Amino acid sequence: MPGDSVNQSNASAGRDVVAGNKNTTVLVLPSVGVEITQAALEAWVIQLQKAIEENDTISHFVRNLQYFHRKKEASDGIVGLEAKLKASGRIAHTEDAIDQKLEFERLLEEWSYYASAQEILAYLLAKVQRGFLLTASPYLNDMDAHALDKVVDQLVLEPIIAECAKIPHFSVNLNVALGMLYWLAEQCFVRWHK
């Protein structure tokens, strides 16, 4: 009926209220399933157990761990853990951060002779780096340090600790998990400043 109009300004439907047609595009992306990563981790754990039993050791870093052993170029010129902590206003964390980084380095050294252990460590470092980049990096200017640390603890470090509980030979607590993060900062893979 021409000339008739409907006022929907106070309409509520629990979703979008549209006069006429609404076209939407839903993007469904395939995800790397938890099953895939769990299967890889389980395979590395089995390989590690076999390597320990057979004393099958190596004297070099596997490619996936070599990736993290290289120091990246710091595009902002802030190199090293202490400098990164200072630049982000976290200088008070320096002593603990260095101790925690050393705890991770001990774990890294202890398991450096087994290829499968190195694959596990590279996998964990990649998860910490990716988790930090997704959960913390976008909010560096928007959240205070304490709130950001809580997010990183809950969404990055605690899942790593839970995952490491499935690895019989690894003992990863919050200090070691933080050590991974600080080690990655030392290598210029993560930072707390923009």
Image (cartoon, grey):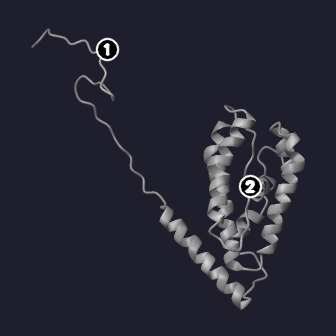
Q: Earlier in the sequence, mark 2 or mark 1?
A: 1
Q: Position of residue 138 (x, y in %)?
A: 63, 39
Q: Say which residue appears at 62% left-offset and 56% top-offset.
A: 159
Callout 2 touching callout 1 (CB < 8 Å): no
Point 75% across, 56% down: residue: 184
Classify mark 2: residues with Cα within 10 Å, few (<14), some (14-19) or many (20+): some
**Along the viewing direction, whichever of 76 and 51 lies nearer the viewer:** 51
Q: Nearer the viewer, residue 157 or 26?
A: 157
Q: Is residue 130 left or right of residue 60?
A: left
Image spot of residue 78 (x, y percent): 83, 45
Which label sits on residue 174?
Answer: 2
User: Which mark is in front, 2 or 1?
Assistant: 2
- Is residue 135 rendered to the left or right of residue 88? left
| Residue drawn at x 83%, y 56% as measured from the top left | 100
Q: For the residues marked 2 and 1, what is the alpha-carbon distance in whole angstroms?
A: 51 Å
Please say if 72 is above or below 165: above
Q: Residues within 10 Å of mark 1 (few under 14, many from 20)?
A: few
Kind of residue at badge 2: Leu
Q: Position of residue 88 (x, y in %)?
A: 80, 38
Q: Which residue is mark 1?
A: 10
